[in-house]
Amino acid sequence: MSDFRIPLGSWISDGVDWLIDSAGWLFDFLRSLMAAMYDGLENVLVSPPFWVIIAIVAVLAYFSKGWKLTIVSAIGLLVIVGLNQWENAMSTLALVLLSSAIALIIAIPVGIWAAKSKRASAVIRPILDFLQTMPAMVYLIPSLMLFRIGVVPGMVATVIFSLAPGVRLTELGIRNVDKEVVEAGYAFGAKPGRVLRQIQLPLAMPNIMAGVNQVIMLSLSMVVIAGMVGAGGLGSDVVTSLNRVDVGLGFEAGTAVVIIAMILDRVTSGFGNREHKKAKDAKNKANA
């Protein structure tokens, strides 16, 4: 057997060392910025009495799917309060919401770019395949080296892990917009930017909302891994339960994660269905 070996690991390690040496100040700045954003959002969710947050979630659930989801969401959050996991759950929610927001800020423009350019799409798709198939734990190693232990490397790994479906579904939604409707917009003298804002994005919104849903769900699935690097929240309790072989603590933290996941999934899918109905009505109006 040949002794030849591709030194990929050495190349990656040397690249990360070079980044630390040449742009360490940038990663320190990003770390401080992301940590401040997380602390601010966490304070917003943790500081008010629990019933205030439950009321806000109930209102969102009502406008998303109606009274049934409102009641179920409120009961689920009260269960988290009863398990004494409220603060941990809000810390986890802050991490998920902020990571998802950052991922979507990146994913939606990249998805639009991929939809507009076949060449860009050909380059972006293999990168997305790589991001989706690489084990999530691997992202923590360079994240820890660049941002040090704490919530930030967990957020960075979460953003990278959850990015791909947002890009793919945005691209799919833009590409699936009826070409005749787009051409009609251009025929009436609309500029490309206006066609994108007023025709393509509204009609692609169901797919984009599906991408939002998937990004949030993938972000939530990273809470345990983020807990391994000091992110806190429910992930920290799950890691602690693993180290102590504490079945009760692990089950309580896991139940809180499941409740948050179900509420976020139902609320985002509900808003997605509303956007689908709007898009269908707009398309029927355009074809009339």
Image (tube, rainbow, N blue to C red):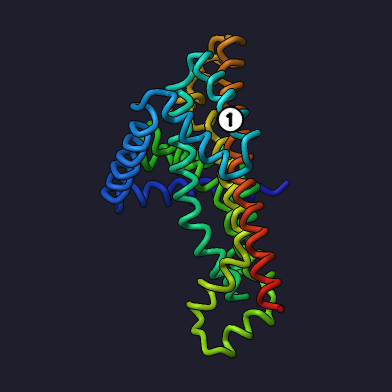
Q: Nearer the viewer, residue 226 or 219?
A: 219
Q: Nearer the viewer, residue 238 or 54?
A: 54
Q: Residue at x 45, y 40 (%)?
A: 155
**Where is residue 4 shown, x and y percent of the image?**
63, 51
Q: Residue at x 58, y 73 (%)?
A: 199
How would you rate the neighbour count of disc 1 (Cα within 10 Å): few for under 14, some for 14-19, many for 20 or more? many
- Residue 265 in which image quadrant: top right
**Where is residue 149 shown, x and y percent of the image?**
38, 31
Answer with left or right where residue 29 lies relative to residue 216: left
Q: Nearer the viewer, residue 241 or 123?
A: 241
Q: Is residue 80 above or below residue 274?
A: above
**Where is residue 133 shown, x and y percent of the image?**
65, 47
Q: Is residue 286 above or below residue 274?
A: below
Quarter of the image with the C terminus is bottom right
- Residue 174 in which image quadrant: bottom right
Q: Residue at x 48, y 29 (%)?
A: 54
Total numbered labels: 1
Residue position marked by numbered label 1 in the rendering: 73
Amino acid at the residue labelled 1: Ser
Q: Is residue 6 above or below residue 181?
A: above
**Where is residue 284 shown, x and y percent of the image?**
71, 72
Q: Residue at x 38, y 23 (%)?
A: 49
